[in-house]
Image: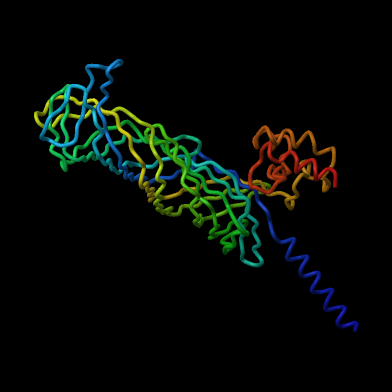
Amino acid sequence: MRSVAALISILLLAAVAGASAATPIDFMIDAAASGLDGTQTVGVETSGTLIGDWDPVDNPTGTRTKPGIFGSFGDTENLPVDVTLSGQIGGPLNTAPTGTFRLTLDPAAGTVEVADLAIDLLGGTPLQRPATVTFQSAAFRTRNPTSVFPGGVPITLPIGSVTLSTLTATQIGSLGLGTLTETGPDTYDFAVGVAVQYAIAVQLLGTPLTPPPLPGVFAFRGQIVISGATARLTSVRPLEFAVTQNPAIALPEFPLALPTVLPPGGTANVLMNLTLDEIGFTFDATATIAADGVVGPTPRPGDMNCDGFVNFDDIDPFGLALQGRAAYEAAYPHCRWLNADCNGNGLVGFGDIDAFLALIGE
């Protein structure tokens, strides 16, 4: 019995020792030293109709349209024509990501865990791209100007710009687990992948488009150097993904100045009424992540002064944390800003207030 008790004691001590060896580090991405470099493409397929911008009262000299190239064309006829618009809009991708995440290093076990990862891959700066599309239609005629469009002839047209307004990666599911190798005093090589949802939003012809989140993996591979109560992480990894959606969304009517075909040299002013049939996003880039970390005590939601308790003494530092990480860490350098994430969504914001008050009342 004594030997069994001694064995249990040894195992418990080993477990405690193993747990104490794990080092949690809260990281904030250094946007000035980080980047997402590569290419981004948005592909669109639309279908619908065009019609002349003529109006008997407001625009009596406007363009009128009619399907077909033969037959009569009445003085007040203005009829819709079937059309399609398609295009590939893209270009260089060069952004400065921002965000936060927590790594827990266990050198004895050779493991690293990722938690609470939330990264804005655009760094809060939307990307605009000039949009050029290919126009095709059935054969039709116009008046003001008088012209014939034979149909089936692709016409390349500029239509303004497309804006990529959102590209974020937010951790989902359980902790991401990876490998950790000590390569020198307080220096480690690591590799870890974490399950995320990529959120994407685009502004196309004045219409916001938000496809469902795309599940994927965000991977880190690089080096961590710990210096006292701080740490520095560097990682360079490829980031590639593609998604296609069929939203069937009616786009707002918009005007288009259409170059005439027969004879050339004129401009037919028409109104486009289209449905977005398909939209695709493709990213092929290298993600360079440099992040500064704070080595601190074991995370405890709501314990904003890191005294081991959640009580009224934490109210003022919690309010400071809501103002931003920099202000909080300047006042509480040995505590954890992400302790203010009381609702567990990986972010610090006003949505944490109710959960924080509930923790005080426990």
Compare residues 322 and 295 and report the one nearer the observer: 322
Residue 181 spot, x, y in % from top left: 57, 64
Coloring applied to the structure: rainbow
Residue 99 spot, x, y in % from top left: 56, 43
From what the image shows, is residue 269 above or below residue 68?
A: above
Residue lying at 39% horizontally and 39% vertically, measured from the top left: 250
Left or right, 3 with respect to 225, comes to right
Residue 110 spot, x, y in % from top left: 61, 66
Left or right, 335 with respect to 29, comes to right
From what the image shows, is residue 150 above or below residue 346?
A: above
Residue 274 spot, x, y in % from top left: 33, 38
Residue lying at 86% horizontally and 78% vertically, measured from the top left: 6
Which residue lies most toward the right here? 2
The mark tally for this picture is 0
Q: Which part of the image, by quadrant, shows the N terminus?
A: bottom right
Q: Quadrant of residue 109?
A: bottom right
Compare residues 243 and 148 and report the one nearer the observer: 148
Residue lying at 52% horizontally and 50% vertically, measured from the top left: 234
Compare residues 191 and 138 and report the one nearer the observer: 138
From what the image shows, is residue 271 above or below residue 103?
A: above
Residue lying at 52% horizontally and 42% vertically, measured from the top left: 120
From what the image shows, is residue 11 above or below residue 316?
A: below
